[in-house]
Image (cartoon, grey):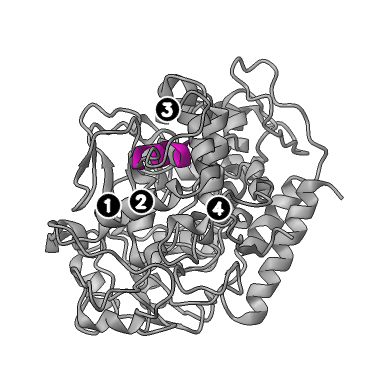
């Protein structure tokens, strides 16, 4: 059995486990089943005539009848919206250098090592699973106090939103579901105006890219990696209700500094932990020094940021069938996917928010915030249930970007989701409310009807998540781009789903389990990654 076939078999089994345990449901199964049927023919080489074709990118052949009129229409539309299929090949030019193998290797170790979290039980890979395209294995993220499993059988308290896919994030000018990490210039590779974050980080000017600047933030998040041990004595901005999570596991939180936050003291402790490991000082010396191990204290936060981002930038994810089609391969897409593309960029109006041109960097997002009235779902607050206070009088709402901006006019607004490689995700929207790509798309066609008629059972919402009020969201006003319902015939709807599911999937993301190291330099145990057996 080929590696690709093994991966698809594993994903199907994984989806079945989700169905059996009532956790989250298999968009994986139906989405990749569609992909598997489309990819059934033997693979062909990528178009040789494309001057910047990616030699290692697997090409996908389609058994189709060539429709030249359809191709002419689609190529004209792709030109008009600015889609070239060459964004992945632009990385080295935009970065100004090739990727550094020593930094990539170091960043890979850091990504999988729990040493970055003071609670000692979660790594970057705990929320960004290699079996799910380095995205969330759950509909809503689970961080600290976990059972060491990454996948459908992960157990611990939930956070508030889903962890995003990691591949291609170097091209994002705004990160996180509320776009609260931003390249001020609009270019994630341009540090001239710095990178804006909420307090206490504020403006970071010491890195080259937004992705690098973001790389150290997860260590400071108590629900993700730092944990709540010691918060009783060092509460900072946290109220007494969070003391129930102070369970004595891992390293206690340091006292907050003059900003009132724990963030920077946590970063100092993470640097110290790494500096205490000779193997890491040797690796950082190879990546950032003259090849000799760094002296104690030599590892810095910016080195960590650069190394983690270097690994993330090494992950492929933007050579999907649509990219190959845009570079000249007429057979990279099926006719159904081509018709779906014309709907996406035309009648269905998807590209108005899921943009590809200019600062969107062909990521299928305008990286702006919109109110699209996604269902409100939430866990109960408490040990083993949820460790984030939700908003609203019933603590059952997510106010979105208002949490950062403080502006009530931005309540319930979230950043447009990039659409590449969604076929490997188990759930959709910021909180995993929808269980299939089809359901997520259908919501956009008639927002009010979908929001009021939301059925958690149909969308296989986990039993520990409840549905919050939707009327306050609708009363706040739906984005004008979605205010009027759109009607698509069944055939057209199926074409649109096929386009989003298959045409934007770079099948190399199915091989990310190969990135799991046998061990990490700290000697700490790795998570168990379901789907990577």
- Is residue 51 or residue 302 the one in the foreground? 302
Q: Earlier in the sequence, mark 1 or mark 3?
A: 3
Q: Earlier in the sequence, mark 2 or mark 3?
A: 3
Quadrant housing residue 247: bottom left
Residue 369: image tag: 1
Q: Which residue is mark 2?
A: 416
Q: Earlier in the sequence, mark 1 or mark 2?
A: 1
Residue 522: image tag: 4
**Nearer to us: label 4 or label 3:** 4
Residue found 55% across the figure and 53% down from its top: 522
Circle 1: element type: strand
Q: Earlier in the sequence, mark 4 or mark 3?
A: 3
Q: How far is disc 4 from disc 3 in space, using C-alphas?
A: 46 Å
Highlighted magenta segment, given as a residue range? 301-310
Q: Quadrant of the image for the C terminus?
A: bottom right
Q: Are marks 1 and 2 in contact (CB under 8 Å)?
A: yes
**Nearer to us: label 2 or label 3:** 2
Residue found 63% across the figure and 74% down from its top: 18
Asked if 210 appears above or below 208 in the picture, the reply is below
Q: Which residue is mark 3?
A: 82
Of all residues, the one furthest to the front in this rendering is 295
Q: How far is disc 1 from disc 3 in space, using C-alphas?
A: 22 Å
Q: Earlier in the sequence, mark 4 or mark 1?
A: 1
**Can residue 85 be seen in the rendering of this structure?**
no
Q: Are marks 2 and 4 in contact (CB under 8 Å)?
A: no
Q: How far is disc 4 from disc 1 in space, using C-alphas?
A: 40 Å
The x, y position of residue 530, in whole percent, is 66, 65
- Is 14 inside the magenta-drawn segment? no
């Amino acid at each position: 059995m080929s590696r690709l076939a093994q991966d698809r078999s594993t994903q199907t089994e994984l989806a079945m486990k989700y169905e059996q345990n009532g956790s989250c449901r298999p968009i994986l199964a139906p989405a990749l089943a569609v992909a598997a049927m489309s990819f059934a023919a033997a693979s062909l080489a990528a178009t040789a005539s494309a001057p910047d074709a990616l030699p290692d990118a697997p090409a996908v052949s389609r058994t189709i009848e060539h429709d030249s009129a359809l191709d002419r229409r689609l190529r004209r539309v792709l030109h008009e919206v600015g889609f070239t299929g060459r964004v992945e090949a632009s990385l080295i030019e935009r970065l100004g250098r090739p990727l550094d193998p020593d930094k990539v290797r170091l960043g890979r170790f850091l990504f999988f090592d729990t040493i970055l979290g003071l609670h000692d039980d979660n790594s970057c890979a705990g929320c960004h699973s290699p079996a799910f395209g380095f995205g969330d294995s759950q509909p809503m993220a689970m961080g600290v106090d976990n059972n060491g499993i990454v996948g459908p059988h992960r157990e611990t308290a939930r956070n508030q939103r889903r962890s995003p896919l990691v591949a291609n994030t170097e091209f994002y000018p705004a990160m996180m579901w509320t776009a609260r990490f931003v390249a001020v210039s609009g270019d994630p590779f341009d540090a001239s105006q710095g990178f804006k974050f909420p307090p206490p980080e504020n403006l970071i000017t010491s890195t080259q890219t937004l992705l690098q600047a973001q790389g150290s933030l997860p260590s400071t998040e108590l629900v993700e990696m730092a944990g709540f041990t010691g918060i009783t004595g060092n509460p900072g901005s946290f109220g007494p209700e969070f003391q129930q999570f102070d369970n004595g596991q891992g390293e206690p939180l340091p006292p907050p500094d003059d900003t009132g936050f724990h963030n920077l003291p946590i970063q100092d402790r993470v640097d110290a932990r790494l500096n205490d490991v000779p193997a890491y000082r040797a690796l950082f010396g190879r990546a950032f020094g003259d090849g000799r191990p760094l002296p104690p204290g030599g590892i810095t936060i910016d080195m960590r940021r650069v190394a983690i981002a270097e690994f993330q930038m090494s992950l492929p994810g933007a050579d999907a069938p649509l990219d190959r089609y845009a570079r000249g391969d007429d057979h990279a897409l099926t006719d159904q996917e081509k018709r779906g593309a014309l709907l996406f960029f035309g009648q269905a109006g998807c590209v108005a928010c899921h943009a590809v041109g200019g600062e969107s960097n062909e990521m299928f997002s305008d990286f702006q915030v919109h109110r699209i009235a996604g269902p409100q779902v939430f866990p109960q607050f408490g040990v083993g249930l949820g460790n984030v206070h939700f908003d609203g009088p019933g603590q059952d709402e997510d106010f979105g970007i208002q949490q950062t901006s403080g502006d009530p006019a931005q309540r319930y607004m979230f950043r447009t989701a990039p659409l590449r490689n969604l076929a490997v995700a188990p759930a959709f929207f910021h909180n995993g409310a929808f269980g299939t790509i089809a359901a997520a798309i259908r919501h956009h066609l008639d927002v009010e009807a979908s929001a009021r008629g939301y059925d958690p059972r149909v969308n296989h919402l986990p039993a520990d998540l409840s549905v919050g009020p939707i009327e306050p969201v609708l009363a706040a006003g739906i984005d004008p781009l979605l205010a009027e319902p759109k009607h698509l015939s069944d055939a057209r709807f199926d074409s649109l789903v096929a386009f989003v599911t298959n045409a934007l999937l770079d099948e190399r993301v199915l091989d990310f389990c190969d990135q799991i190291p046998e061990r990490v330099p700290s000697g700490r145990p790795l998570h168990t990654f379901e789907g990577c057996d």
